[in-house]
Image (tube, rainbow, N blue to C red):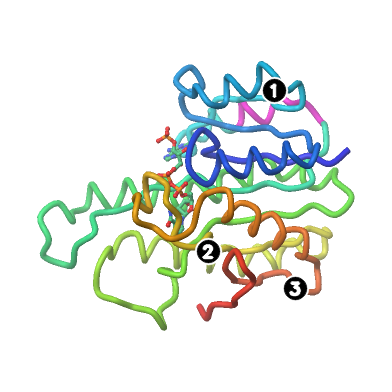
Amino acid sequence: MSSVLITGANRGVGLALTLTYLGRGWDVVATARQPEAAADLARLARDNPKLMVLRADVTDEASLTAAALSIGDRAIDVVVCNAGVMSNRGGVEAAGNDAADWNRVLATNVTGVFVTARAFMGHLKRANAGKLALMSSMMASSQLAAGNALGYRASKAAVANLGANLAVELKPAGIAVGIYHPGWVSSDMGGPGAPVKPNDSAKGIVERIDHLTLATTGVFEDYLGKPYAF
Ligand SMILES: NC(=O)c1ccc[n+]([C@@H]2O[C@H](COP(=O)([O-])OP(=O)(O)OC[C@H]3O[C@@H](n4cnc5c(N)ncnc54)[C@H](OP(=O)(O)O)[C@@H]3O)[C@@H](O)[C@H]2O)c1
């Protein structure tokens, strides 16, 4: 039976990914930083023994290590590093675009992704052909620089770079790495006017992960398979 672990699974794209994988009959480990406030996950877990909800704050390495320990030495086929935050949306002189905001965004979007991959590496290695999916953004691409949301763009560019390097490092271990833009999604982050529904994004991302192999490891593409330049 196939299994997936998804961070930031209590709302938005993460919740939609959880629903999509459960719909396929996969075992899903959904993490949330406040499971007690994750009403949608709690409701799903009541009806679905294949869903396990764990606490993990990606800025707290100990919480990820504890989550990894709590699931023992089982294999996990796919780890999706989905949790992320938006930065101050302004430019270099915008009010609030300060070190504290950069540190918050980099800790979540970059260090958080790395530490998640590190915490569950043993579980991925025990899978037959493990896959690591990193949620970046088209805003990572320097070709699409727009002079705003500077901290977010830098963080997602770092995620893309991390993914490219992990793809090289993990290929000999048989683990493929995909870097994804989920589309402009109508989540809390994307806003209600965004054109892509979370479920459509999740369906596309899951299909892209299905297609990910060691031959395509390091790919940076959107939920429909459109490639992006770093
Ligand atoms: N929406 C878009 O248009 C879009 C476009 C490109 C890329 N993305 C990326 O796609 C991913 C999902 O985005 P989304 O639209 O679903 O965002 P969202 O609606 O804002 O949801 C973000 C999720 O990340 C979790 N999270 C934030 N900080 C965390 C932390 N320190 N530890 C654990 N979980 C944390 C949130 O949990 P809480 O509820 O506890 O805050 C929430 O579950 C993100 O990486 C985002 O950058 C989104």
Identify the mark nearer the N-term, 3 or 2. Answer: 2
The quadrant where residue 225 appears = bottom right
| Label 3: element kind | loop
* Residue pictured at 44% horizontal, 51% vertical: 109
Identify the mark nearer the N-term, 1 or 2. Answer: 1
Q: What residue type is labelled 3?
A: Thr
Q: Work out whether 132 lies above or below 169.
A: above
| Label 1: element kind | helix
Identify the magenta region: 65-73
On screen, residue 74 versus residue 44, left or right, reads: right
Question: Quick one: label 3, few (<14), some, or many (20+) residues within 10 Å?
Answer: few
Between 202 and 59, the one nearer to me in the picture: 202
| Label 2: element kind | strand
* Residue pictured at 72% horizontal, 69% vertical: 217
Which x, y percent locates residue 38? Answer: 49, 24
Residue hosting label 1: 70
Ligand 1's image quarter is top left
Alpha carbon separation for disc pair 1 and 2: 30 Å
Q: Residue 216 carries which label?
A: 3
In this view, the mark in front (1 or 2)? 2
Q: What residue type is labelled 2?
A: His
Q: Is residue 98 magenta?
A: no
Residue hosting label 2: 181
